Each structure stands twice: as C-alpha cells, then as structure tokens.
Image (cartoon, helix red, strand yellow):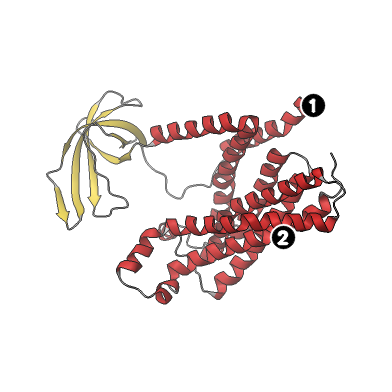
C-alpha cells in the first residue's frame, strides 16, 4: 500500500526532472562569455561623481577570480554607474562579485566587466533552511509540499514563460497551468479523496471567475499591461508582438491562484470533518456549514491580497502622498488602476470560491463515512 502511495510522488519527481531538462525558447541574443565569482580586493572610486543623490562614473576594481579555469588570477574590472538606483551597485573590498569572462578566457591586462554582487550563496542557504523547516514541521506532508513548490516553479519557468514568448495566449496558458498545479497540489495534500476533489473543483471555479473578470474589467478600464515591470525591455528584445493586456490578465490569474487554492482546501477540509463527525447531516446543512467556514476565512484572505499588492507598490503610494495627490486622481492613474483590478479580481475569486466549494462539497462529501 505504501508503494502505491509513493507512485504519484515519484511521477511528480520525474515530471520535475523532465521540466528541468526541457529546452526553453531560443534566445534572440546570446550572452557572450561566462560569469564567475570573484573577490574584490581593492577599489578605486576616483572616477565617480556625485549627481545629487546618485553616483555616476566608473568604479575600478581589483578582483581575485574564485572559480572556473581562471581561478586564482588577479585581474582588473570596471563597474559602470549610470545614476540609476535600481541597477547601480557599489563594491567594497571583501565583497564577492560576479564578473564576465570573455570567450577564450581573460587576456593579460584585459579589463573585465563587474556585473553584480554574488547572492546565490545566501539565497541557497535560505532555501535550504526553508526546506529543513518545512520537512521538520510538516513531516512527510511537508516533504510533499516541498516537491509541489519546486514543481510549481518549474511549470512557471519552463512551461508558462516559454509558451507565452512563443505567442500562446498568456491568460489561457496561465489558467491551464493553474489547473495542472491545483490538481497536483490537491492530490498531494488530500490524496485521491472526495475532499481533494471538492477543493479542486471549487478552486477551478474561482480561478475561472477571476479570469473572466480580469478580461472584462481590463478592457473596460483600459488596462494595457504596460504597468508590468520590464515590459519595455521585453518588447525591445524582439517580442513586440506580445499581447500585453492578455499578459496582464495571465499575471492576475497566477497571482491570485494560490490564495484561491488555500481557501478551497480550507472549506473542503472543514466540510469533510463535519461530514465525518455527523454522517446523517442533510446535504443542505452541510452546505451551510461550508458557507460559515468560508465566511470565517474570506475576510483575512482578501486582506492578505490587498496587503500583498499594496506592499509591492508602497513607494508609489508614498510618492502620491508626498505630492499631495487627491485620492480620486491617483486611484484613476494607470498604475494604481492596474493594481486595483488585480486586487479586486483576486478578492472576487476568493469570495466566489467559498460558496462554490461549499456547493460542490455538499454534493461530493455527503455520505462520506470513510
């Protein structure tokens, strides 16, 4: 029996491995050279000028290569500052940086390009700590949740993103991905049970509602999708044919799908427990119980979405506040309107998924005595 239970997890691992090695879209421009780690041993800031609050100029670095065929060599590198806070970086002696090694290796006296600070080490440590905590607290269930987490990342990076770049509809691609992830996550959490089926059906109804509303109100409110980060860089990279409003809708669907799945599972799990404790409970009363469970969770979940979206644009709100902009004016702006659509569409999906799961659960879970 245990071997049969492990088959779905093994299939998920195999699918994750297949996605990892799946080829991505052909890049329009290839990055020449390779990035390697290097320790900054000395810096020269004499060519940096102060432009108000920003720095402009060139920072000269002396670096020791820590990896690759050039390991151990001491070379020179430049760090160009463009007076842009979002991309500029300042190195200090002792920092670990990534530098670009040209094809064929660095020649004697050649100046390299310092790309950025090296962050993958601490990022890996944080991820491993998260994995350990999840497995320690959740046990086998936590391990399955970890596999679903990795699988979700791979689906987005190896399936959703490449298909959207190839011209597929971003909104329907995102919806299909959410359907797949919902099925996998619900099955891993609840197993092949009526509870899992009820949560899966309820979450899909909620996500589909969000998809339809995002399409409708995105057009009614003239949301063109240009508010998404790095859109211009993507268009100028050779993907000018992308349907940006459709990409915006797909992003809204992906952003709210996790909370929708959580709420659907909460309602389905509560109804399943009620049905187990009182098998003679009428279907109507079971549905009412599901509604009450949903009401208790919906309030906090919608607030969670609001705080998540507003936290991403807190500096924009600070700008409006500092300029004394009237609330009616900044709510009507393109940036805030786009976030309003995301927040309200996701919240509508959450509110809608609770009664949907209660209705479906009352039909599926009724008489579930096992």
The residue at 59%/59% (across/down) is 299
Give the residue at mark 1: 1
The N terminus lies in which quarter of the figure?
A: top right
Estimate how packed mark 2 is, as few (under 14), some (14 to 19) or many (20 or more) residues with alpha carbons within 10 Å.
Answer: many
Q: Where residue 26 sits in the image (x, y, percent)?
A: 51, 47
Q: Where residue 196 sits in the image (x, y, percent)?
A: 74, 45
Give the residue at mark 2: 355
Mark closer to the chain start, 2 or 1: 1
Estimate how packed mark 1 is, as few (under 14), some (14 to 19) or many (20 or more) residues with alpha carbons within 10 Å.
Answer: few
Q: Where residue 291 sits in the image (x, y, percent)?
A: 72, 58
The residue at 51%/73% (across/down) is 222
Residue 80, compared with residue 147, is above or below; it is below
Q: Is 335 situated left or right of 74 in this image?
A: right
Q: Quadrant of residue 138?
A: top right
Q: Quadrant of residue 253?
A: bottom right
Kind of element beneath mark 1 = loop
Q: Is 258 situated left or right of 264 in this image?
A: left
């Amino acid at each position: 029996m245990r071997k049969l239970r492990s088959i779905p997890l093994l299939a998920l691992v195999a699918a994750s491995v297949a996605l990892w090695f799946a080829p991505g879209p052909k890049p329009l421009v290839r990055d020449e050279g390779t990035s390697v780690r290097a320790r900054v041993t000395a810096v020269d800031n004499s060519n940096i000028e102060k432009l108000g609050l920003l720095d402009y100029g060139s920072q000269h670095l002396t670096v020791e290569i820590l990896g690759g065929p050039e390991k151990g060599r001491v070379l020179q590198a430049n760090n160009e500052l463009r007076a842009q806070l979002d991309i500029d970086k300042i190195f200090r002696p002792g920092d670990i940086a990534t530098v670009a090694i040209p094809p064929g290796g660095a020649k004697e006296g050649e100046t390299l390009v310092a790309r950025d600070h090296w962050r993958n080490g601490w990022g890996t440590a944080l991820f491993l700590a998260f994995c350990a905590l999840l497995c320690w607290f959740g046990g086998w269930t936590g391990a399955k949740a970890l596999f679903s987490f990795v699988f979700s990342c791979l689906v987005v990076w190896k399936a959703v993103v490449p298909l959207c770049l190839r011209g597929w509809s971003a909104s329907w691609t995102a919806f299909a991905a959410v359907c797949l992830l919902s099925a996998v996550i619900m099955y891993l959490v609840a197993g092949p049970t009526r509870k899992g089926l009820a949560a899966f059906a309820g979450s899909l109804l909620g996500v589909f509602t969000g998809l339809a509303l995002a399409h409708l109100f995105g057009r009614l409110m003239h949301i063109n999708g240009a508010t998404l980060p790095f859109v211009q860089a993507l268009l100028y990279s050779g993907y000018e044919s992308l349907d940006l409003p459709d990409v915006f809708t797909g992003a809204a669907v992906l952003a709210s799908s996790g909370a929708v799945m959580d709420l659907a599972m909460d309602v389905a799990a509560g109804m399943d427990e009620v049905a187990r404790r009182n098998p003679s409970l009428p279907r109507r009363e079971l549905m009412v119980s599901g509604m009450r469970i949903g009401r208790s969770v919906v309030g906090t979940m919608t607030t969670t979405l609001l705080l998540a979206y507003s936290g991403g644009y807190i500096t924009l709100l600070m700008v409006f506040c500092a300029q004394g902009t009237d609330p009616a004016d900044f709510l009507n702006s393109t940036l805030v309107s786009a976030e309003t659509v995301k927040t309200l569409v996701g919240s509508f999906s959450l509110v809608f998924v609770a009664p949907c799961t209660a209705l479906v659960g009352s039909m599926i879970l009724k008489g579930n005595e096992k």
